[in-house]
């Protein structure tokens, strides 16, 4: 058995909380329904989740952080009472009561975790950053490379992929800005014939970046790119 069906099943199982809360796209809900028809384990899990959904229906996952924290004096009061009680004979009733309180706290934590998970799962994924392929001119023999750049608010990122960078040698990457300055964008170590994928970040904004270059330990240009 490959991992594929197991992964698919895990994903469906993760959807159960979302489904129980009535969230998810029509397609996702239909997929969960179809799966539930043939999977007793997931039906049982859904049956366990369903009683929780009534309590969660009114909870906006985005506002969980706004829930009031217990007042700080509560902790002091509890500590004072423990100190006052001191070491004494084991009181089974008190111990049982304590255990009940712990169970209630654990149940509340589970409810919060489910609410958080459901909120997280139903939140849309952030869009993938736009990759802009750029032409790479390789100077050094035996090196092959491709590159994409990603514009960020803090500067441009160069995603460099390739092979043939001398193993153990430190390479330096600079981004050329429009004023003709070479701005450092980081370093990497060559891994020889092995495939190398690395992300290099510079403080030059995409609109101010004119290209980049990879230099070897002696400062010679190994490859360069003009945007
Ligand atoms: Zn299942």
Image: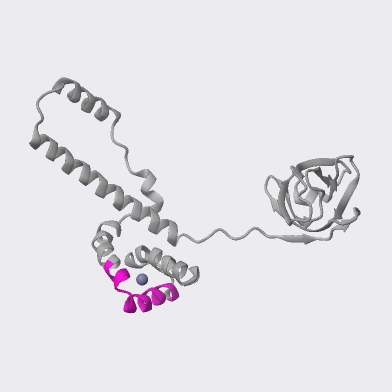
14 vs 95, left or right, is right
> How many numbered discs sit on the rendered protein?
0
- Residue 8 position, x and y percent, is 46, 70
Among the 4 quarters of the image, the one containing residue 15: bottom left
Q: Residue at x 36, y 66 (%)?
A: 16
The residue nearer to you, when weighing 195 against 153, is 195
- Residue 3 position, x and y percent, is 49, 68
Q: Residue at x 32, y 79 (%)?
A: 37
Residue range corresponding to the magenta coloring = 27-44
87 vs 128, left or right, is left
Q: Quadrant of the C terminus?
A: bottom right
25 vs 22, left or right, is right
Among the 4 quarters of the image, the one containing residue 33: bottom left
- Residue 132 position, x and y percent, is 74, 60
- Residue 99 position, x and y percent, is 17, 41
119 vs 227, left or right, is left
The residue nearer to you, when weighing 31 against 40, is 40
Q: Residue at x 32, y 50 (%)?
A: 112
Instruction: Report ligand 1 position as a quadrant.
Output: bottom left
Judging from the image, the colouring scheme is: one colour
């Amino acid at each position: 058995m490959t991992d594929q069906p197991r992964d698919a099943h895990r994903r469906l199982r993760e959807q159960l909380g979302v489904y129980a809360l009535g969230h998810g796209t029509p397609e996702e809900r239909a997929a969960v329904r179809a799966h539930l028809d043939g999977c007793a384990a997931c039906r049982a899990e859904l049956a366990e989740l369903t009683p929780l959904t009534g309590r969660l229906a009114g909870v906006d996952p985005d506002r969980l952080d706004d829930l009031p924290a217990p007042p700080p004096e509560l902790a002091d009061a509890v500590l004072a009472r423990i100190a006052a009680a001191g070491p004494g004979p084991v009181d089974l009733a008190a111990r049982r009561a304590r255990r009940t309180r712990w169970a209630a706290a654990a149940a509340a934590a589970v409810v919060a975790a489910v609410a958080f998970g459901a909120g997280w799962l139903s939140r849309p994924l952030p869009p993938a950053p736009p990759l802009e392929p750029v032409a790479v001119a390789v100077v050094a023999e035996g090196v092959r490379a491709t590159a994409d750049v990603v514009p960020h608010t803090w500067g441009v990122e160069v995603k460099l992929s390739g092979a043939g960078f001398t193993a153990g040698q430190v390479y330096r990457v600079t981004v050329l800005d429009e004023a003709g300055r070479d701005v450092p964008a980081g370093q990497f170590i060559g891994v020889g014939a092995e495939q190398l994928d690395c992300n290099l970040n510079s403080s030059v904004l995409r609109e101010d970046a004119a290209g980049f270059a990879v230099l070897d330990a002696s400062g010679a240009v190994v490859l360069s790119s003009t945007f």
